[in-house]
Image (cartoon, rainbow, N blue to C red):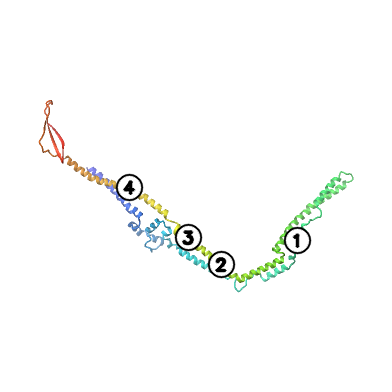
Amino acid sequence: MCVIFGVGGIIAIVLLVYFVAGLTAQRFICDPLTEPRGSRVFADVESFVQLERVLFGERRDPDFNLTAVLVACHDNRTLYRALALQRLYNLTELRAGTAARVAASVAALRTDYPPRGRPLRILSPAARRKLDRLADTGLSDFDFDRILYALETNMTSLSLDGLSSQLESTARALAPRGGFAEVARDLRSAAEHLARLHRDVVAPMLQRTAELNATASELRDVLRFNQSSLKEAIHYRIRDTTEVELFLNTQGPDLVQNLTRDFAETMGARLQEYLSMVTEAAERDVGRCGPLSHAFNSTRDSACRAVLMPTNGYWISLAWCVLLFVPLLVVAQKLARLYRHPDPYPGPLVEAYVPLALPQTHTHTYTHTRTHTSLHFIRLCIS
């Protein structure tokens, strides 16, 4: 009996230790992580770990703590809102500051150009006089078409290479005849001279003539500036320059200011649109805590619901078995004692006679005990 109670006591102590450890883990880890709001554990942790002071170096918002960050993360908010990063990077103030800097840049770009009171000149009077003198020169009356016509005509009235071939054929025809050998030799010498003249003189002249023709055509087109003559082209360009100077001196300052203002306003509007997009993305889209929350919940459920709670249930069941086993042992001991307690039978003794065939006479005495409501046969006495 002592051994049974000793072993049972040791088992009970082990079960108690496991039960206390499981209950402690459930109450101090799983329950606070499941519902951090109103948890004393989180309150005690937040008294030591001041998240606001760690992030911002100050203690200003009492509602900003680990519980608030965890709840915001479970609500699938962005990190910008969950960690209250607007206190470090206020995008609204950034937009206002950008608008102010753009306005300052616009004001700096407003220059007085062309300067009022001083007329702007593209061509100086000396340059105008030189252009007028160039227009009055004979270059504007240069007849390029005549040069081109002269260059396009043949350099010689006859083709020297053709004449050389004819002389060579005539010399070959006269050579067999008697008395014409010297004439044939002179004709062959003249043919060679004409061929050499065509190769060394006429052909290079034709090549240079073609190059001169291309240069004259290009010079004619360039000097005229798409006009009928160089003089007309110069006067046309001087007139255009005068009109440009007049426009810049009368409408130039306003035009420059308007262009500058339109450019600055357009760039400012694009910057504001971009900052609005960045602000909206940072507050609503970028860095959502949903995946992090799912990973956190999955880890917590795997540790608490899949491991800790079944373990606690198993050991609690064993603990109930041990707790019920102890009183059952006591009750069983009591029942065993009551079962084995003898009680004399109050009735008369009954003797039995053994048949004569037996070697000796045996007297059988039957004793009965009464336990509670039933009579049981206990012992047989053989005399």
Quarter assignment of residue 358 = top left
**What's under tag 4, amino acid-wise?**
Thr
- The residue indicated by pointer 1 is 145
Check if mark 2's residue and mark 4's residue have beta carbons within 8 Å.
Answer: no
Numbered disc 1: secondary structure: helix
The answer for how far apart the CA atoms under marks 4 and 3 are is: 49 Å
Mark 1 or 4, nearer chain start: 1
**What's under tag 3, amino acid-wise?**
Val
Q: Would you say 212 lies left or right of 240 here?
A: right
Q: Which disc, if any, is residue 311?
A: 4
Residue 8 locus on image (x, y percent): 25, 44
Check if mark 1's residue and mark 3's residue have beta carbons within 8 Å.
Answer: no
Mark 1 or 2, nearer chain start: 1
Mark 2 or 4, nearer chain start: 2
Numbered disc 2: secondary structure: helix
- The residue indicated by pointer 3 is 278
Q: Which disc, if any, is residue 237?
A: none
Q: Would you say 159 lies left or right of 265 here?
A: right
Check if mark 1's residue and mark 4's residue have beta carbons within 8 Å.
Answer: no
Residue name at image x 71 percent, y 66 percent: 232
**What's under tag 2, amino acid-wise?**
Thr
The answer for how far apart the CA atoms under marks 1 and 4 are is: 111 Å
